[in-house]
Amino acid sequence: MENNHRTALIKSFDKGQDKDKHFWAQMQKVFAAFHKQHRTTLKAFGKGQGKDKHFQSQIRRVFAAFYKQPKTMLMVSVETGILRANVCRYVAELQKQNRISIVRKGICPISKHRAGFYTTNPELFPSIVEPSNTVSHETCTCI
């Protein structure tokens, strides 16, 4: 079943039926990087590609969920049915690749606690660079 879903996604991408090509280009980059890292890790532990395909499917679904609109990890976990621990792991992996960013911090509508709202959509990434706390020597009035 997983293979059929992947084939359908590839066919729709190849035929250009998907309107958001940027999204699918990003997905393929994430998939390639994630696949490369986890393929070698799983082979080192003697586990074939059985689990690898499961992780590939999950990271794609997590990436897609964060792409639609900014969400917390718990919101994505509930929406996709993927364990929150796995979502957290995939977010860390995507952060290493600079493919996900925190848009804002706020109250999660599910847990009612403070949480970060993440997005994988580059158009929504914050463009504000945080000011540094260092003082320039030119403006320093010491000695």
Image (cartoon, rainbow, N blue to C red):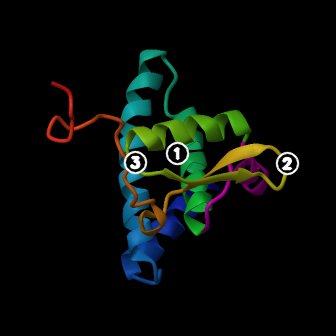
Residue that label 1 marks: 56
Do the CB atoms of the residues marked 2 and 1 lie less than 8 Å apart? Answer: no
Q: Identify the amino acid type marked 2.
A: Lys
> Mark 2: which secondary structure?
loop
Taking the spot 36% from the left edge, 36% from the top edge, the residue there is 133
* Residue 28 position by quadrant: bottom left
Disc marking residue 130: 3
SS class of the residue under badge 1?
helix
Q: Nearer the viewer, mark 2 or mark 1?
A: 2
Q: For the residue marked with disc 3, what is the amino acid? A: Glu
- Dot placed on the residue nearer the N-terminal end, 1 or 3: 1
Question: Residue at left 37%, top 65%?
Answer: 25
Q: Look at the image and tell me in which quarter the N terminus lies.
A: bottom right
Which comes sooner in the sequence, label 2 or label 1?
Answer: 1
Q: Indicate the position of residue 50 as horizontal and vertical percent values.
A: 56, 35
Q: Position of residue 51 (x, y in %)?
A: 58, 33
> Do the CB atoms of the residues marked 1 and 3 lie less than 8 Å apart?
no
